[in-house]
Image: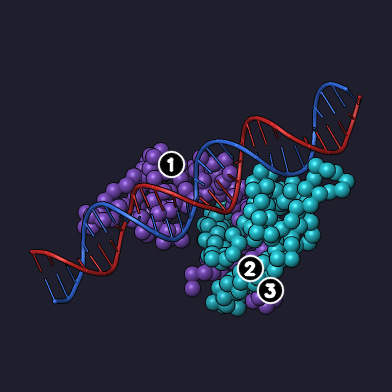
Chain colours: A cyan, B purple, C red, D blue
Amino acid sequence: MTTDELAESLSKELRHLVLLLRRAVAGQPVTSQQYAVLGSLEGGPRRMTELAEEHGVQLPTMTVQINRLEEPGLVARGVDPADARVRTVELTQEGRARLVAVRRSRVAYLGEQLDALTEDEREAISVALPALAKLGRA
Amino acid sequence: MTTDELAESLSKELRHLVLLLRRAVAGQPVTSQQYAVLGSLEGGPRRMTELAEEHGVQLPTMTVQINRLEEPGLVARGVDPADARVRTVELTQEGRARLVAVRRSRVAYLGEQLDALTEDEREAISVALPALAKLGRA
DNA sequence: TCGTCATAGTTAGACAGTCTAACTTAGTCT
DNA sequence: AGACTAAGTTAGACTGTCTAACTATGACGA
């Protein structure tokens, strides 16, 4: 398969996977984006700029998202003692619990889908993951 | 790797791929969703209900999207002579041209990313694609 | 044949996610 | 001190999505 043909097929399957992912979080108490932001906070407090870059969005977008997570108490804003311009964001206990719960149900959903495949198919996906992880991170 | 671990890793990489895809269409004259809808029309006219199901959205959502594609003349609505309730949607010449152009640039972007991988990595992705295609279609 | 129910689609109103532009506040550097 | 830079927020606009309510058409039994 040429690189172009591969790009074509991959482009097609990515669209499919996006729809799959959407179903994986449908009906959850947090949206797909909120889940992703909570995930970024798991390792400890982060600054707004970092979060925006990591998620590939502009700073104002992240402000909005953090506002909506702060209102129900899933995250808390703090300040950086070394630089008063910087706002930090961290998970609350509630936010951490929510993250774990959503992750569990999301993984469970994907797990069900994977169970429907053959062992060889799962193996193929497993082998391809590192390559997919590298894509776009060049 | 257990199925659960695989689900966990896949869940993580899917998030990454979503961001990659978003960059692939950033700045294009149609959004990612509009591109997907145009793609569904490539094989000929479709009915609204079909499109909504294929894209996993409610009918009103598709109405809105088709409205926005119809306004600049990329698609045209028609009727089904056999059932007056049914509206059909098809690509205009303009819409087809737009679709081809966007696909070209999207594939080019993914192609660049794939070029940055090793031959083995591309091969791994290629082998995994059929399995990914099957995911969620059980 | 008519009344009832089902189907296809649109309209209206709401909210999340995203952007750019403009603003505020704080640090930096000469 | 003054000018520039950096971090965030606010404001306004647009896309994408949903549910609820509506219109119009088709189907089917009494």
- Tell me which chain the residue with mark 2 is part of: A
Marks 2/3: CA–CA distance = 16 Å
In contact (CB < 8 Å): disc 2 and disc 1: no
- 1 and 3 marks on the same chain: yes
Residue A138 visible in the snapshot = no
> From the viewer's perspective, is B50 left or right of B4?
left
User: Which sits in the foreground, A47 or A67?
Assistant: A67
- 2 and 3 marks on the same chain: no
Judging by the rendered image, the residue that carries numbered circle 1 is: B97
- The quadrant holding residue D27 is bottom left
> From the viewer's perspective, is A8 left or right of B65?
right
Q: Which amino acid does label 2 sit on?
A: Val
Task: Pinpoint residue A21: horizontal percent, then vertical percent.
Answer: 56, 63
Which quarter of the figure is the N terminus of chain A placed in? bottom right
Residue drawn at (74%, 62%) of the image: A92
Q: Residues within 10 Å of mark 3 (few under 14, many from 20)?
A: few
Residue drawn at (70%, 48%) of the image: A52
Marks 1/3: CA–CA distance = 43 Å
Judging by the rendered image, the residue that carries numbered circle 2 is: A102
In contact (CB < 8 Å): disc 2 and disc 3: no
